[in-house]
Amino acid sequence: MATKNEPLEVSASDLKNSWHEFLEQVSRARQEIVVTRYGHPIAKLSPYEGPADGGGIFGSLAGTVTVHGDLTAPVDEAWEADA
């Protein structure tokens, strides 16, 4: 039996026969499983680690901007370019 940090090695045929049980172990115990064929590792099944914030780049700054006054209203001061 593998420790918490050490992946569990399972043959491809055992994985095929008990697929749902191994998926449950990866999901609940957060343990990696190394799939072997003829004693050689061929794949690794590991828990999904999604983005920390659950979002992405789009919308990540929503609600962080504060507007003070009307940005498009004319100003009362003369600019150097207008003089």
Image (cartoon, rainbow, N blue to C red):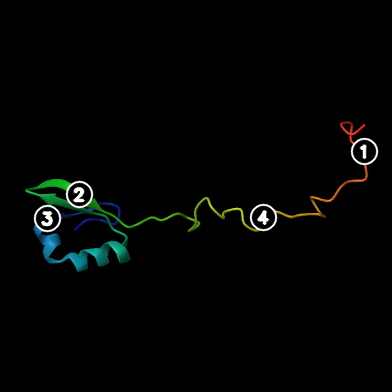
Residue bearing mark 2: 43
Query: Residue at image x 49%, y 57%?
Result: 55
- Residue 64 disc label: 4
Q: Amino acid at mark 1?
A: Ala
- Residue 11 disc label: 3
> How many angstroms separate mark 4 from mark 2 (CA)?
43 Å
Tag 1 near tag 4, CB within 8 Å: no
Query: Residue at image x 65%, y 58%?
Result: 63
Query: Residue at image x 84%, y 51%?
Result: 73
Q: Looking at the image, is mark 1 or mark 2 nearer the viewer?
A: 1
State which tag comes first along the sequence, 1 or 3. Answer: 3
> How many angstroms separate mark 1 from mark 2 (CA)?
70 Å
Relative placement, left or right, of 24 versus 51 is left
> How many angstroms separate mark 1 from mark 4 (CA)?
32 Å
Residue bearing mark 1: 78
State which tag comes first along the sequence, 1 or 2. Answer: 2
Quadrant of the drawing holding the C terminus: top right
Q: Amino acid at mark 4?
A: Thr
Under circle 1, the secondary element is loop
Q: Looking at the image, is mark 4 or mark 3 nearer the viewer?
A: 4
